[in-house]
Amino acid sequence: MVRTVVTGIGVVAPNGVGTDAYWKAVLAGSNGIGPLTRFDATGFPVCLAGEVDGFVPGDHLPGRMLVQTDPMTQYALAAADWALAESGTAPGSPLTGGVITASASGGFHFGQRELQHLWAKGPGHVSAYMSFAWFYAVNTGQIAIRHDLRGPVGVVVAEQAGGLDALAHARRKVAGGAEVVVTGAVDSALCPYGMAAQVASGRLSTSADPAAAYLPFDRRAGGHVPGEGGAILVVEEAGRAAARGAAVYGEIAGHGACFDPPPGSGRRSTLARAITTALADAGLEADAIDVVLADAAAIPELDAAEAEALAEVFGPRGVPVTAPKTLTGRLYSGAGPLDVVTALLALREGVAPPTAHVTDLDDDLPVDLVRERPRPVGGGAALVVARGYGGFNSALVVRRTR
């Protein structure tokens, strides 16, 4: 059986740039959510965001790339550089190295800039340039070019679930013979064009209090805070990593994905099926999971559906659940890979970070939420759950390797 392990990580998050800085911030409850400063949000119902702080593009990328890329791509390129440097590996041939990432908000900053240029020429020039879907592939292409990776490439677009699906696809490519795959996701859409699209979902919090705006599983839940960032990981076959003496964070052990039924159908969410599929793929029973990293929508009916799915698989309050994204905001496709990083570090350190700010837990929800302070947990396996707007469900099991 081919086993896929993580040997390098690069993190860019609102509460920490770099893996160590992010992990320390999560354990300390350092909040990366604050007033939205990237643009004048007057007229928008949202005034808070998880903005990346302390990242200076010129410190990480050559000047020619700064004018050709938007923040999302700059974050992704830097995170990929860090992950590959930490991994200390490269494919034996460019054709056996790949890049598989995800995107949910690709190109909004670039699109915003182009729209402004076009609008300056007059409204008549704008309508023909409103589609920037091609930009979804830019992160993957830029990373591949920068590191001469000419093997399997791909971009998964499944909103927040896409980040986990990208890792699963990378795992399949390793099983198929790829030596090294750079994978994960980084997202950013904190611009007027991007914010308009996010507001349209009806799921954003309108609170002005950074400590009370994003409250999943809380009686006061009223939507999420948008954020930017994510994580890029380097994965390879376990035997290859062992042969070269590489330090290993853990194994990507199992994955499951499915779609919810249409709204108004009266049918239940299929999230539990995604979870059981991931467990079966990993060859694990439910009691082998030490901690769950929740999707944490902070919409009452969605929180209830997630809590019920977890109870169906693990029993009511049967497993510790945490959602550190209350410190970063919802990072869309970047959220899943960042949660995977958090899960791997939690298993390594034997401690689950808390879900910050949730003080009025909804007792009707059968979920054992880690709050107030980190909680000791076993170091065997963790489950990461992600759901995307439009009905996407994804679950990923990671396992500690000894």
Image (cartoon, helix red, strand yellow):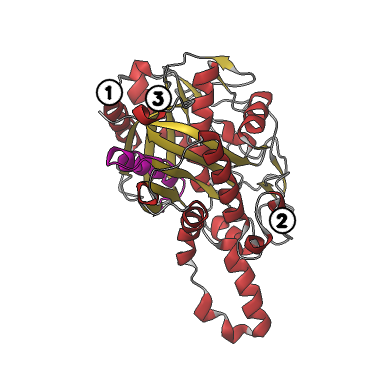
Mark 3 or mark 1, whichever is nearer to me: 3
Residue 77: % across, % down: 57, 50
CA gap, disc 3 and disc 1? 22 Å
Q: Amino acid at mark 2?
A: Arg
Give me the disc on residue 283.
Answer: 1
Give the extent of the magenta segment.
Answer: 156-179
Mark 3 or mark 2, whichever is nearer to me: 3
Q: Do residues under tags 3 and 1 come within 8 Å of each other at their CB atoms?
A: no
Q: To which residue does mark 2 refer? A: 38
Viewer-side residue, 134 vs 251? 251
At x 62%, y 79%, the residue is: 118
Q: To which residue does mark 3 refer? A: 242
Q: Secondary structure at mark 3?
A: helix
Residue 170 included in the magenta stretch of the image? yes
Numbered disc total: 3
In the displayed structure, 350 sits above or below 271; it is above
Residue 160 included in the magenta stretch of the image? yes
Residue 274, quarter of picture: top left
In the displayed structure, 145 sits above or below 385; it is below
Quarter holding the C terminus is top left
Residue 173, quarter of picture: top left
Visible residue check, residue 299: no
Left or right: 344, with 125 as reference point: left
Residue 102: % across, % down: 45, 50
